[in-house]
């Protein structure tokens, strides 16, 4: 028998290695941006097309490469950053494995232009799936531009594994944010399909956070009281407990200016918040640790996001105490922010601009004498300001008994025997004053047609609001209340992009606003909400839509209505007046669907006398 072991050709080995380093367009974003930082660039531009499928390009003004180096750079294990094994423990650079460019060149089309400041001419190189197809001197600016096109063109299976554009773009944004946060002194740009999403001029750490995550972040931050020990230097910001979200949270831990994931240290931070936050709230932080490079190992994983510390336990304890200390300080005294840069208050886009006249929108179809689509509930005589509670879309203020009577008899529910109870018994014919009792600030209990009805008030209100919002979303002329003073909400560029896409939906439910470069200016809001509810509504809707934008118009409307009613529905523990209780029951029974909440939960339960008799 002949020998059967063979060495894999380089291009095959590179493709296999690429699987570890480049999983998706975002991995290339990380590697190319890190190379630009290692090349000492002060301005780095990231250009994306089609969520990175068609193009990921990084342009830097760094040290550039010679013609020979430019060619060498694409060989596997080709690096200028380390020479011997010991160098691994003195790392000051992001890269050192010499794998990224070889991997990217194995699975995409590459166009490179690079020039050192001392050279007259630069070098242009093109590669397709590890094959050099072109190399010539060229005229180009100092620095390097690497364009990666048609990712996975030669590995269809990997291409098919990519997620939707929204998801891939989310990953790219995550990587961009991580790199930009770790290097506030570098000027970063991000263009997506030729739209400028971010323009982040050099600044301090706090302002970089604000530029990335929107103006509203500033008030949420508490600076870490700097812990400077021989083991570790800790700096950065944590988010005040009252602002912590329940869903996705912003957690950024940088070690020697490299974003890392470390469950153990994450636990240290979370445990410092213990007792101050609800169990389902996750801490948010932007922390920067500096340690002696010889005490860490970042060589554990090809993507270099995991890190092992020699002094793990000491760092855990120091980090926990630093976070606790800062939270404590913040609790007793408001934070004074001495590092605040006064230029921050005027966004740079506005610096030299003339102020704009506020625009007022009016609803030309509004007729005060027309029958109102939105009216207060029949029992509401208190003339309170419009609030979410009073959102009654029912045209006529019918009593719930009669509406209940009109319900279709075939309500499809898992426990049909309950529904078949004496809904239409004779007792309905003898009207009596219905008393509604509130139970545990969670349920409303009443009788109906001889049955005892127990209603979950939160779910009932969700249903009422949901059907109201769905109607508004179908109807393009929804009345809105004009705000006396425009309400401003700051947002990041990426968030504003999403808001722009959702603007027609917002308008359908009565929000009137203009989009400025770093915020929205709201001049009108739906009739049934109050100013204080605005930030929550926007944040909830954005959160949901950023995660995964529903594609069909109908499911978008549904998602939108759901997010709104989740936010605005009365919560367990909220005390309702007698009128409010009655109005809620009335409104519930005038809904198209009365038994199931928009989130698929049962709204009420009815116990017939027969069933009660079985019990007692
Ligand atoms: P590593 O970063 O681990 O060294 P890479 O494959 O990412 O490996 O890059 C290989 C080499 O190419 C780097 O060591 C560096 O010398 C050179 N290089 C890559 N990108 C740039 C750039 N943007 N500017 C200058 N040199 C670069
Ligand atoms: Mg690299």
Image (cartoon, helix red, strand yellow):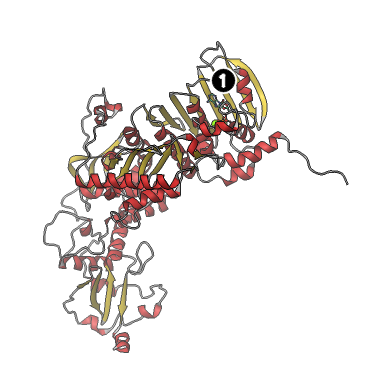
Q: What residue do we see at 27% from left, 46% from top? A: 327
Q: How many marks?
A: 1
Q: Residue furthest front?
A: 230
| Nearer to the camera, 391 or 427 | 391
Give the quadrant of residue 21.
top right
Q: Residue furthest top?
A: 120
User: Where residue 121 sits in the image (x, y, percent)?
Assistant: 57, 12
User: Where residue 414 sits in the image (x, y, percent)?
Assistant: 42, 74
Task: List the residue tagged with mark 1.
Answer: 65
Q: Is mark 1 within 8 Å of ligand 1?
A: yes
Please determine whether, in this image, residue 466 is positioned above or below residue 231.
Answer: below
Q: Residue furthest right?
A: 1
User: Where residue 25 sits in the image (x, y, percent)?
Assistant: 53, 38
The reply, left or right, for residue 199 in relation to residue 4 is left
The reply, left or right, for residue 59 in relation to residue 154 is left
Please determine whether, in this image, residue 302 is positioned above or below residue 356.
Answer: below
């Amino acid at each position: 028998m002949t020998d059967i072991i063979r060495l894999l050709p380089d291009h095959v080995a590179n493709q296999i290695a690429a699987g570890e380093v480049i999983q998706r367009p975002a991995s290339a974003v990380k590697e190319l941006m890190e190379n630009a930082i290692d090349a000492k660039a002060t301005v780095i531009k990231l250009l994306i097309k089609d969520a990175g499928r068609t193009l990921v390009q990084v342009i830097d003004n760094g040290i550039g490469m010679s013609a020979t180096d430019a060619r060498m750079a694409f060989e596997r294990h080709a690096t200028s950053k380390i020479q011997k094994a010991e160098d691994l423990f003195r790392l000051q650079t992001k890269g050192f494995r010499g794998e990224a460019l070889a991997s990217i060149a194995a699975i995409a089309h590459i166009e490179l232009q690079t020039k050192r400041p001392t050279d007259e001419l630069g070098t242009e190189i093109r590669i397709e799936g590890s094959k050099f197809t072109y190399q010539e001197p060229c005229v180009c600016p100092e620095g390097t531009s690497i364009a990666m096109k048609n990712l996975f063109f030669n590995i269809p299976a990997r291409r098919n594994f990519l997620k939707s554009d929204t998801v891939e773009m989310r990953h790219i944004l995550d990587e961009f944010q991580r790199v930009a946060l770790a290097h506030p002194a570098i000027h970063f740009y991000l263009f997506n399909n030729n739209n400028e999403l971010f323009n982040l001029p050099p600044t301090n750490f706090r302002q970089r956070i604000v530029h990335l995550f929107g103006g509203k972040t500033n008030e949420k931050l508490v600076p870490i009281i700097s812990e400077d020990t021989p083991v570790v230097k800790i700096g950065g910001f944590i988010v005040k407990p009252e602002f912590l979200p329940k869903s996705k949270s912003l957690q950024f831990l940088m070690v020697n200016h490299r974003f890392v994931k470390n469950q153990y240290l994450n636990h240290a931070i979370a445990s410092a918040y213990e007792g101050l936050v609800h169990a389902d709230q996750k801490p948010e932080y932007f922390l920067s640790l500096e340690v002696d490079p010889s005490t860490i190992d970042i060589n554990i994983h090809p993507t270099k996001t995991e890190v092992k510390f020699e002094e793990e336990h000491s760092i855990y304890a120091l980090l926990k105490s630093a976070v606790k200390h800062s939270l404590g300080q913040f609790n007793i005294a408001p934070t004074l922010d001495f590092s605040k840069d006064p230029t921050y208050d005027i966004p740079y886009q506005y610096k030299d601009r003339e102020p704009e006249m506020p625009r007022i929108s009016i609803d030309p179809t509004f007729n005060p004498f027309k029958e109102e689509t939105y009216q207060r509930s029949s029992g509401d005589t208190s003339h309170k300001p419009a609030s979410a509670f009073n959102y009654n879309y029912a045209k006529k203020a019918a009593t719930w008994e009669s509406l209940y009577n009109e319900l279709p008899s075939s309500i499809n529910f898992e426990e049909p025997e309950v529904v078949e109870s004496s809904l239409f018994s004779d007792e309905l014919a003898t009207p009596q004053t219905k008393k509604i009792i509130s139970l545990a600030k969670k349920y409303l209990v009443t009788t109906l047609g001889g049955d005892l009805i127990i209603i979950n008030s939160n779910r009932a209100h969700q249903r009422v609001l949901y059907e109201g919002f769905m109607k508004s979303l179908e109807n393009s002329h929804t009345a809105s209340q004009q705000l006396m003073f425009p309400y401003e909400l700051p947002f990041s560029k990426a968030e504003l992009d999403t808001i722009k896409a959702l603007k027609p939906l917002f308008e359908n439910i009565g929000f009137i606003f203009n989009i400025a470069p770093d915020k929205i200016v709201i001049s009108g809001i739906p009739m049934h909400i109050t100013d204080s509810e605005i930030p929550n509504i926007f944040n909830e809707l954005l959160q949901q839509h950023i995660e995964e934008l529903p594609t069909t118009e109908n499911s978008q409307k549904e998602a939108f209505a759901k997010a709104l009613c989740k936010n605005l529905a009365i919560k367990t523990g909220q005390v309702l007046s007698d009128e409010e209780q009655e109005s809620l029951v009335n409104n519930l029974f005038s809904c198209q669907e009365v038994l199931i909440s928009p989130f698929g939960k049962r709204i009420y339960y009815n116990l017939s006398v027969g069933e009660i008799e079985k019990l007692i």
